[in-house]
Every structure is written in structure tokens, then in C-alpha cells.
Image (tube, grey):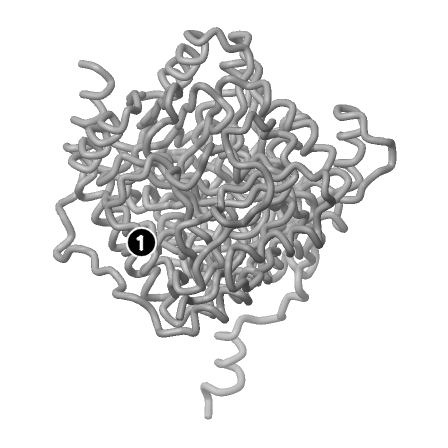
Amino acid sequence: MTSGTKQKDHATLAGIFNDDEARVDWHDKTLWFVRHKRDLAARQLPEWEQLRNNASQIKNFVLSNLHELLLDFERNAIFNGAHVHWAETPEEHNDIVKNIIARHGVTKVVKSKSMLTEECHLNEHLEKNGIEVVDTDLGERIVQLANEPPSHIVLPCIHWKKEEIGELFHQHLGTPKGVSDPVVLTSAARQHLREQFMTSKAAITGGNFAVAETGEVVVCTNEGNADLGVQLADVHIVCIGIEKIIPARKDLAIFLRLLARSATGQPITTYSSHFRRPRAGQEMHIVLVDNGRSARLGSDDYRAGLKCIRCGACFNTCPVYRRSGGHSYHTAVAGPIGSILAPALDMKKYADLPFASTLCGSCSNVCPVKINIHEQLYKWRQDLVRNGHVPLSKRLGVGMMRIALSNVRVFRMGGWIVRRIMEHFPSILTGSFNPWSKQRELPAAPRQSFREWYKQNRAKK
Amino acid sequence: MTSREKILAAVKKSQPPAPPSTPTRLDGALPVEAKTQFKEIVKAIGGSVIEIENTGQIAGHVGQKFPAEASILCSVPGAGIGTPPNDGVVFEKLNLVILRANFAVAENGAVWITDRLLPDRVLPFICEHLALVIDASDIVPTLTEAYEIIGSDQYHFGTFIAGPSKTADIEQSLVLGAHGPKSLTVFMLAEKN
């Protein structure tokens, strides 16, 4: 988001997404279909809950030993022949990556999916410095051509319809107008991106897991775009957050059994590539990024967010995400997990996100590493109110509610007044100051309160 | 202080005390008929399994699907088909690559292959079609057993390959052959008696 322009909040952006009701229904159903596939996959493993417990415990172990594990990882990665870099901030990360690429005199780089580089806005930085970035995941390439951020961490263009992608490809890749068959469009993208792979000397990937014991980085894709990029390039740059470390190689058995099943319902992604040493003549760089992670590690309330393995299951199950779309969250990682991660980076800018939830708890129930997402959402709301990041209308409303609910007389009087208003001037309560009245009608007001009714009908008996 | 020192100091200060118990890990899953499950799963994820008695049978199967002029690279001894690696072949033009792989996993149809069996690391990703050869006796039930076999192997690069390259990024419609192979065939060598 560009600074200077006022960022619209989640509710406003969701409102815009909701203008097209048919599209919302389609978006909702498509994501629920993915959630359903996750359920089918999970139920095939009797040990599913045990796997979740183990994954959660291993991640807790990582958080308690991160300092030592980072040192182990660094030592082993260097032993393997990789260069390890450390970046405190997104700016530092972007500069490190830019300098590596610039040193090789390269002006084009292929990049597979990495939410960290989205978080750091790496593409913009590289392009400003004259380096073209080609996102090679099909969904990411689509949103990149459309000059948009991804709307989902696993399914980046889940909000796009095939007819629109056909039009986009017609403009950018020269496919015939009106073509919307996914097979034809994918084939056009394959040819277009193959050219990019064959001519790019540098490849950037994210990393799903970084193994402390072996210094290797594991990258999972279905398309094979990370592998093609890396294996054809002279320089491989891995960009990862410091929380991606896992202790031992055998822990991959647990995480890889959970990751794809949680994400898309596949038993495993097509490629799970273990990059331990660069090829002869190839350079491998690993950039470890903090950007607020070490601070979050010190917070008892929000530390668990660092356990996330970016499967996207909480997105697919969330009734709010499915009906508001990824862009309404105005942050790189949307959905329930994004709503607890973003406020730690900028409480003011993302104060709306913890409220973009029904607190139903489904996110926590599907999370493969058992992050208490909905509890953290609730916790954030309290912290946001305490720090004055909640709009005046909400504070006033809740303040009035507190007075009414803590004083019997005010409660009775208030009830009486509101019933009269509902009866005679209902429009007062459904004005623009009350967002709850959007798409809703007031029920008919009862003549009396239950207390009045009880006194009249029962109390005397 | 460098960023490295700052980050490590911040992490050390922030990290919570260790949990009371070290994490437990699963010791293997329920016994399954690994070979049958593997065949079912590979089919489900868009690949195919062909059972063969010896590597000499590969050529016959390939001949049914590929024309004589197809560009084929084969690293399997005794297959008698295609050109061997290091023969100056243009990788990008390869119609089919046939490689020996390490072992396979029943629960997810994944085949493990490391750089020692890869004449070039890019081969399994750049070809139009890929075939991997494994021994039927080398199929383990789950990833738990898979990582026991991998152990502390000092491979430089290793990858699990499960089915052909695929994407569902356009309206969740599954399309095979996103960037890499459009098909994956696993040749399963019968157990030696």
C-alpha cells in the first residue's frame, strides 16, 4: 500500500467485494471446496491429531531454543557452502538481495512463491533498481501481470475468474481473445515462463523449512517452478523468516505429512526439494529475516503465531475470509493468521483486522500446528481498545453498554426508551452510525420487557 | 553491532523457557500394504505405475507411447533405450527422461531421488515427460519410515517427486504440466526371488 493515501479498512474493502453477490458466492464455495478436500485428507490418517500435537510440540521446542537452532543452522549451511545473511528489517533484506543480484550483473530474476518477499515488498525494491522480477508460480504470475498482490498465500489468484485471466493473457501473452480454457491458458503460461527460466541467471525462492541439523532448506511446490528456476540459475537466493527453522531432518516427516493435506488436501506437494549444497559453480545465499519476529517471540500472548507453516487452512475455513476476499485484509498474509500477525508490525494500520472475525474458532481447529488463532484475535481486540486504536463510535457504544449493563435502573429505563424508539422511529437505530443495520432489518419491538411481563403474569401467583 | 548480533541477542532475550518435555515423535504408522497403496495414490495424483520384471522391459512400454524420433535420455543400465547422459543432448528438447530413483512412499505416492542418481539436477524438472524406476521392495508406508532411510545421508540435493507437475491456480481446475513434466510414470521392478 502506498503511504500517504488513507488505507480503507477491512469492513469497507469487504463491502466493495460484496457488491458482486454472485462472485462472493462463487469465492465462498470454491474455498469451502478446498477446505472439504482438507477434511477428506485429514480423515484418512488415524494419527492426524497426534501429528498435529507433535508438530505443535516441535514448534514450541523451536521457539524455546531458537537462538541455538539459528546458530546450528548457520554453521551447517556455511559448512555446506551457502552464504548466510541476516536482516533485521525489510529494507535490509531487500538491499541484501539487490546487492547479490547486482554483483552478478543480472537484470532479471525468477522468483517462486515467498510470502516473506511479499511482506518485505521486495519486487518493488528490485524493480526500482532496474532488476526485473518474474514471479513464476502461475497464480502469482497472474496477479503480477494484473499489478495486484496475491489474495491468498496458497491460491494467489483465487479471486480471479478464468474469463478474466483469459483477457489478461490476451493482453500480456498474446493468447487469442475469448480463450478461457484453463488447459490452454496454463499451456500459454508454461511457454511464456519457460523462456524466463531459460534466460534467468538468478533465482529467488522462499523456504518452507530450514533444518538446523543439516543446514538444508526445503521448498515445496506443485508446479516445479522453484526447482526449474534454481537448477537453471547461477545464483540461488533463499529468503526466509527466522521462525522457519526446525530442529532435525526427521521432523520433516511430520511437517510434510501435515502441510499439503492441510493446504489443498493433497497427500504431499508434487515437489518437496531439499537444497543442501549448491551445484558445482552455483552460489547459494540464505537471507534470514527478523522484521519483528524476535520481538513477538518475547510476547506470551502472541508468540504462538510464529509456529505458522503457511498452509492457508485457516483462510479456507474462515467464514469472513471466504466472503470478504483476501484483498480486504490489506496485508501480505491475509485471513485469520494474517489478522494476528499484522497488528504486531503496525498496530494502528492493522487495528481493523482482529475485528474481521466471528471468533468461531474454526481457524484454530484446522491449524496443523495448533495455533490458538481465535484466542489471539480476541486478545488483540482488548489490546487495541486499551491502546486507543478503536474508532470512537465503537468506544462510545461499548461505553454506553457498560453503563447500562452495570446499573439496574439505567438498564430498565434504557430498555423502555429503545422499545419506544423501535416502535415509532426505527430509522433512528438503523442510521449510518450503526454498521450492524447494514443488510438487516429491525425485529418488531415487544411492548414490554420480560420483567414487566413476568410481574404482570406470574409474580402474583 | 551487526544485524546478526542484534537479531541473535533479541532472540536469546525473547525466547521462552524450554517446555517441560522434549517433543515426542511418532514411531511409524499402522501397517499397510505399501505396494497396493502406492499404486492407488500415484494414480490419484495423476501419475501411473507400470510393473516390470526387469529393466529390459522399459523400452517396450516407452515404444507404445513415444514415436521413434522422440528425444529420450535414460540413465537406467540395461534399459537399452534413449541416449545416455553426457551425450550433449539439449535438455530443453527432451521428450522423456528415465531415471533410477532411490525409493518411494506409499501414503503419498512420492519418489525420493538424490543428486547421486541425477546426471543433472534440472533433468526431472525440465523434461516433457518423466519416468522413474524403483524396486517394488523399496516402498515404505509413510514419510516417517522414509526419513529413517534417508537418515543423515549427505546428499547435496534431494527431492520427493509425487506425480506430474501440476497447478490448479485457474479456478481450481487441475491442469497437469504446469512447468515441469506433463506426465509421470513409475516403473516398479518386481522383487527378486
Q: Which residue is mark 1?
A: B147
Q: Residue at x 55, y 67 (%)?
A: B40
Pointer 1 indicates a residue of which chain?
Answer: B
Quarter of image, res A277: top left
Please say whether residue A327 is visible from this viewpoint: no
Quarter of image, res A344: top left
User: Which quadrant is home to the N terminus of chain A?
Assistant: top right
Above or below, comparing residue A332 to residue B168 in the picture: above
Is A54 left, or right, of A42 in this rendering?
left
How far from the left and from the top, in percent, is residue A194? 64, 28
* Tag count: 1
Mark 1 neighbour density, 10 Å: few (under 14) some (14–19) many (20 or more): some
How far from the left and from the top, in percent, is residue B138? 39, 60
- Could you say which is closer to the camera, residue A123 or residue A322? A123
Q: Residue at x 55, y 15 (%)?
A: A108
How far from the left and from the top, in percent, is residue B133? 49, 53
Quarter of image, res B74: top right
Q: Residue at x 43, y 30 (%)?
A: A116
Secondary element at tag 1: helix
- Could you say which is closer to the camera, residue A257 or residue A434? A257
Please say whether residue A206 is visible from this viewpoint: yes
Is A141 left, or right, of A229 in this rendering?
right
Q: Residue at x 63, y 35 (%)?
A: B94
- Could you say which is closer to the camera, residue A213 or residue B186? B186
How far from the left and from the top, in percent, is residue A408? 39, 63
Above or below, comparing residue A292 to residue B188 in the picture: above
- Residue type, label 1: Tyr
Above or below, comparing residue A6 to residue A421 in the picture: above
Above or below, comparing residue B37 to residue A212 in the picture: below
